[in-house]
Image (cartoon, rainbow, N blue to C red):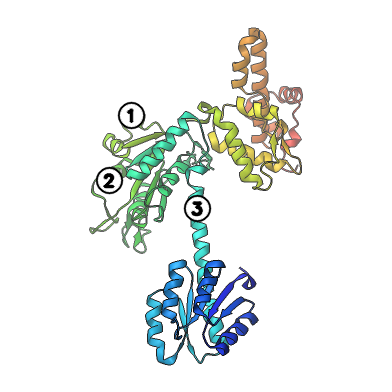
Amino acid sequence: MKKQLEKILVIDDEAGMCSLINTVLSDEGYTVTATQKPQEGLALLKKDAFDLVITDLRMPKMDGMEILQAVKSVSPAMPVILITAYSTVDSAVQAMKLGASDYVAKPFKNAELCSAVDNVLEKSRLRAENARLRLELEEKYSFSNIVGNSARMREVFNYISRVAKAEVTAIIQGESGTGKELVARAIHFNGARRSGPFVAIHCGGLSETMLESELFGHVKGAFTDAIKDRKGLLETADGGTVFLDEVGDMPAPLQVKLLRFIQEREIRRLGSDATTSVDVHLIAATNKDLLAEVKAGRFRNDLYYRLAVVPIQMPPLRERMEDVPLLVRHFIQKYTGAAQKDAVTVSAEAMQAIMLYSWPGNVRELENIVQHAVAFLSGGKSITVEMLPQALSGAPARSASCAAADRSFREAKAQVVDSFEKAYIADLLKKTSGNITRASELAGMDRKNLQDLIKKHGLNAGDYSPTT
Ligand SMILES: Nc1ncnc2c1ncn2[C@@H]1O[C@H](COP(=O)(O)OP(=O)(O)OP(=O)(O)O)[C@@H](O)[C@H]1O
Ligand SMILES: [Mg+2]
């Protein structure tokens, strides 16, 4: 914030002191209002928005302590600096305990006053910034950020509130890109632990020892690379939420250790005998069918039931297509910014292509596609079918099968084959960056035939080469 915008209220019964402080701080660029009457000062405070109050500690009618208390009762976050004589420094210290931000002892050098004011305002600026960021974060992961109005999503919202309130262990299951992590964060930010840490751990892709050390920590020398003691993520998340992502990929020996942790809520660092209690809300997620994993003997039955106190099933996008237009709008807003959000439209043909697509990558895929289309807008206002990937605009299988019944079998089949060809070739060219030789090898197809198909579908290999 610019200094000019920061307003300081000065209350001092001595005219000389009042005008000195006024001059010094005005010279620094602050907007200063000075008064010799404490009551008038308090009245001004209720009328106008100040950023700081500077008051003399000792005044005949109402002293600085009373002013401090009156200010704090009107606006508890308002910083107050006291001006005090050396003889009253003790009471100034006392006043700090009651919430004054700082004091300046008379006689003071101008620079001393300025530095006290700068420091106090800097601190409250930071505090305001933190509060704003926290609000932003809470908003980001509040329900308002999870778009969906379908019955399936409303059910998910219901689960989020209940799990957040009761702090019960939950497992979120669903295909990739359905919003599992988003839901986990919403649970955290809607519960009593919202100001505590949210720690996400990916349980797949790490060796057993590394994952154990990530989760539980280790002591120096526990394994070859353990060169010093290290806190595990469960300990780091104490007081907050731990999100065990891809829990279905957890190696069997660690499943036992996780189960023990859930039962005892204690961790033991790798290589150590000492145990520490840890208080975390556990939320797990997986894109596997965990019960099937249990049946196949790859996931412990007892751990499954410990995790699945509340099972939350994320619906794939294709089962809640009524949410698609809402999501499209949401992502347009996200990628164009608030100013433009209403100006951008989606052509009917493009929306139809979006609605007919089967969305194997779910919301993540939809988000990418909208982001991509928005980047293509370049001045234009409407997202058209040309801005969508070939896989969508090339009439995918879902659309063909949906529309098949009102045509002859031969016609319907021809259309499915046609759209399949186009989507396949487009994908192939994308994968090979338009290299026809590689594309024909990959497809197990004669080069000439591939070229004919590219031509038939109006595609152009050059469009996919990295240089264009
Ligand atoms: N209902 C929704 N509303 C708005 N955005 C969503 C929604 N669901 C998912 N997203 C967005 O889609 C992307 C993928 O979501 P997220 O990472 O939560 O999915 P996931 O299920 O954890 O996927 P994966 O299994 O691949 O890890 C994120 O950018 C997320 O913000
Ligand atoms: Mg995820």
Residue under numbered circle 1: 296
- Mark 1 residue's CB less than 8 Å from ligand 1: no
Distance between the Cα atoms at labels 2 and 3? 28 Å
The kind of residue tagged 3 is Leu
Q: CA distance from mark 2 to mark 1?
A: 23 Å
Asked which secondary structure carries label 3, the reply is helix
**Tag 2 residue:** 262
Residue 137's disc is 3
Residue at screen point 34% across, 55% down: 239
Above or below: residue 123 compared with residue 187: below
Closer to the chain start, of discs 1 and 3, is 3
Report how far apart the C-alphas of labels 1 and 3 lie in the structure. 40 Å
Q: How many marks?
A: 3
Picture quadrant of residue 172: top left
| Residue type at numbered disc 2 | Ile
- SS class, disc 2: helix
Residue 161: image location, x then y, percent: 39, 41
Nearest to viewer (mark 2 / mark 1): 2
200 left or right, relative to 19:
left
Task: Identify the image quadrant of the C terminus.
Answer: top right
Q: Is residue 269 above or below residue 204?
A: below
